[in-house]
Amino acid sequence: MNIMGLADKKEALIKSLRKEGCLKSPGVIRAFMEIPREGFVRPEDRPWAYSDHPLHIGSGQTISAPHMVGIMTSLLEPEKTDRVLEIGAGSGYQAAILSRLVERVYTVELEKELADLARRNLKRAGIGNVRVVHGDGSLGLQEHAPYDKIMVTCATDRLYPAWKEQLREGGILLAPVGSGYHQELTLAVKRKGGFRTKHVLSCVFVPLRH
């Protein structure tokens, strides 16, 4: 494969996402530059790694479009000291982006084949601060709670109690909430045991399985 061709496509994609306002902070832009998306898609899809749309990764799941990864990463307001829980590891790409911005990422994936795939992809990319757990994401991951931030990368009918309980006071929970073919990307901030929520934009994600 022409690696320079991919490099050019990556540069063009990042330039486009910056122009559209999907990539704003220097840290998120740098993470996009450092993480090779082609290492998180199927080999036959690598020529399209830097096209701005989802790609199938197997087990009925997809890797999110780059613009959505940029938007969600920015909304999470990642900080270097954060410990983040991700629900839905997929191929590991979103966790890889977060790995460059936070202290630690725990990502839960129901499909064992995808959990194994994410581990391989992350290891190949030299990422050591992400732990992939095979399990039911609706239950969160009590073992390492509380988390500073929680990101859900699959459509959910509600914000599950485990996520709310495992988030620290002042933390951010971000999830596409809704059923059917459309959801509302919802941002919730934990305040005094309750949650202040707002809908950010309409989106389409594959459903949470559990």
Image (spheres, rainbow, N blue to C red):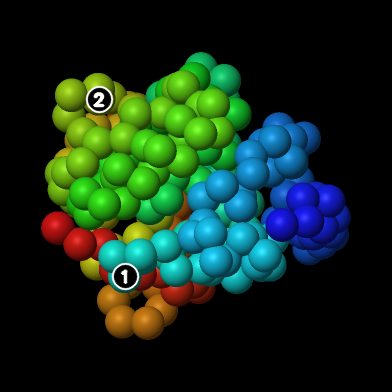
**Quadrant of the frame with the C terminus:** bottom left
Quarter-of-image position of residue 120: top left
Residue situated in front as seen by the camera: 96 or 203: 96
Residue situated in front as seen by the camera: 193 or 118: 118
Location of residue 139 in the rendering, given as x and y in whole percent from the top left corner: 15, 44
Residue 151 visible: no
Location of residue 94 in the rendering, given as x and y in whole percent from the top left corner: 50, 46
* 115 sits to left or right of 151: left
Which of label 2 and label 1 is nearer to you?
Answer: 1
Q: Residue furthest bottom?
A: 181
Q: Residue furthest front?
A: 1
Q: Which residue, given by chain and number where applicable, does mark 1 sit on?
A: 60
Amino acid type indicated by mark 2: Ala
Amino acid type indicated by mark 1: Gly
Location of residue 101 in the rendering, given as x and y in whole percent from the top left corner: 59, 29
Q: Earlier in the sequence, mark 2 or mark 1?
A: 1
Residue at screen point 57% across, 66% down: 45
Q: Which residue, given by chain and number where applicable, does mark 2 sit on?
A: 145
Determine whether 113 is above or below 53 in the image.
above
Q: Secondary structure at mark 1?
A: loop
Residue at screen point 21% across, 49% down: 112
Q: Residues within 10 Å of mark 1 (few under 14, many from 20)?
A: few
* 82 sits to left or right of 135: right
Location of residue 41 in the rendering, given as x and y in whole percent from the top left corner: 52, 57
Residue at screen point 56% across, 47% down: 39
**Quadrant of the frame with the N terminus:** bottom right
Q: Residues within 10 Å of mark 2 (few under 14, many from 20)?
A: some
